[in-house]
Amino acid sequence: MSTTTARAPSGERPRALRFSTRVLILQLAAVLLAVVLAAGAHLWLAYERLWTEAGQNALILARAVAADPNLRREVAAIAAEAGTPPAAELAAGPIMATAEAIRQRTGALFVVVTDEQGLRLAHPDPARLGERVSTAPDVALAGREETVRNTGTLGPSVGAKVPVLAPEGARQVPGTVVGEVSTGFARSGVVDGLGAEALAIGGSAALALTAGALASLALGRRLSHLTLGLEPEDIGILVQDQEAVLRGIDEGVIGISRTGRVTVVNSAARSLLGDAEDFTGGEWASVRVPDVLASLTTTAAADGQARELVVGERVLVASARRVVHGSRELGWVITLRDRTELQRLTRQLDAVGSLSEALRAQRHEFSNQLHAVAGLLDIGEAAQARDYLQQLGASGPLDYPLEQAELLGDPSLQAFLGAKGIEAAERGVVLRLGDATLVRHPVAAPQDVTTVLGNLVDNAVRAAVIGSPDHRGERWVEVELLDDRSALHLVVSDSGDGIGTTAPERLFETGYTTAPPLVAGSELRLEDPGGHGLGLPLARQLARRRGGDVWVISPGRPGGPGAVFGARVVGRTTP
């Protein structure tokens, strides 16, 4: 964004200040107002405190002057006489000398002494001696003390008035009020004392304002950092778009912050994870999710890596990508996609493909048989051609390499296992039915049965191919099927080398496989239909959802025979 300022074109409104800038200005104004108010309050309190201290000092000084024995005796003597001595006599008298000496020592603005009528006996200005004081002395002459703030003949001041009492030996009764002492300090002295206070308060206010400004700047930067530089309007639009996207897609979305906190879990994600509770706001490390999901966000996980997992009856594909804004890493987004129907369709297509291959092979075989009949007719061996056709009619046009297929009372099972038999034969493996095989009723949901049975047969054929042949040099896979009312029991064994030291339950973990890569040095792609490490977990999930199961009957042994797997599919036959 350019930092230069350009004039807005005619008719366009100038751009408003950014939200972070507005917040910063508001914060600075609030800090400035708070600092000014606080500084003003402190100055006012300091001003009042200095005035109060000055009043107390004036009161102490007035008490000390009024308690002087010589002063009390002189004032009582003047009060006992009729009238007041002339100003010249008062100016040269002991009262004036005592008051001025005290004023000069203490730095007071004035030390005034009056008689019982309020006439000045001592005053800094000798010309005003013998005159009545400018401020009423009634309180002090009534025998009480007071502090006052007023403006007298010497200017604004804060002072105190204290009564002067007659001493022992005077002509008045001891304790009689014979005058009053008024002391005061100039307001300028109080204001001068406020200068140091104001300097300290101003310095503190400046520091507080600076700290507030820095804090406001830091808060503004933090706000901009948290909002990624977006304005409130932009954030509102993003929230609306996020809600529309997260609620409007079928894929599950889980958002994880850089600190490991779950920020987003849409309803599709909770549904795909088995109607899990909304764990938004929880710590990702403590959320109960499949281990495959947790491994996608580890430090060593590759960005965009996709993994398959089985959750309940669903086959999910999970991928995780880092979220980066500019140069900042913000966290992870995990996407969940449902591949359950795709897996089922894949199994059905596998069965259809196997049947197609079987039909292609039988078409070729049937063509050869027709050529044989045509040859017999061409050489005039009609009787032999008739016998040959009767044999074909008895055996049928399809000759699967699966003996005793008539024991399977379901045509789909016959066709499926027949096709699997052809595939196994092409790889040098004989697929055969066990002696206990007997299916009397049609299969109600062939896609589920073929998914369970197909996974077991495919694994067995693969194990037989890479394993050791039996003592006759044959590689084989044996399947036994037996229906028991609503349950179909399956047993699949092979001539391979077994599962070795692998724990049986390990085979049913999503993603675990003992099969080698399809091509040396390459890895199995996630996009391969029926990828390794998913068949057995899916088969077990399909079986268990109605009370059945898939398990390892025998792990087998090296040199054969191989592993034996058992399965029970409940509610999958129609009487």
Image (cartoon, grey):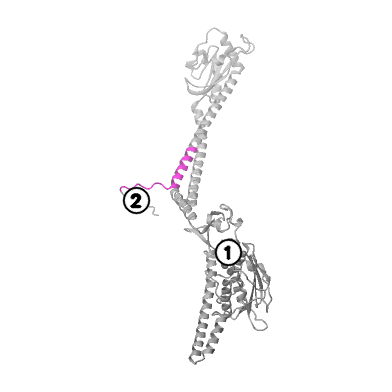
Mark 2 to mark 1 CA distance (whole Å): 57 Å
Q: Residue furthest front?
A: 383
| Label 2 SS | loop
Which numbered marker is on residue 327? none
Q: Is residue 124 above or below residue 410?
A: above
Camera-nearest label, 2 or 1: 1
Q: Please provide the residue range marked out in magenta.
A: 10-34
**Residue placed furthest toward the bottom:** 379
Residue 280 pos. (x, y %): 56, 52
Residue 50 in the image: x percent, y percent? 54, 29
Residue found at the far left of this picture: 10
Q: Is residue 144 left or right of residue 17?
A: right
Name the N-terminal-most of marks 2 and 1: 2
Q: Is residue 79 visible?
A: yes
Asked if 164 appears above or below 186 in the picture, the reply is above
Name the spot of residue 500 as percent of width and height, x first: 67, 74
SS class, disc 1: strand
* Quarter occupied by the C terminus: bottom right
Tell me, yes or no, if residue 94 can be seen here: no
The quadrant of the picture occupied by the N terminus is bottom left
Q: Which residue is mark 2?
A: 6
Q: Main secondary structure of the magenta part?
A: helix
Residue placed under numbered mark 1 in the picture = 309
Who is closer to the viewer here, 560 or 133?
A: 560
Q: Is 7 included in the stretch rendered in magenta? A: no
- 488 or 516, nearer to the observer: 488
Q: Residue at x 50, y 80 (%)?
A: 363
Q: Residue at x 52, y 78 (%)?
A: 359
| Picture coordinates of residue 512, whole percent (x, y) | 61, 68
Q: Amino acid at mark 1?
A: Leu
What amino acid type should be assigned to the residue bearing mark 2? Answer: Ala
Label 2: few (<14), some or many (≥20) within 10 Å? few
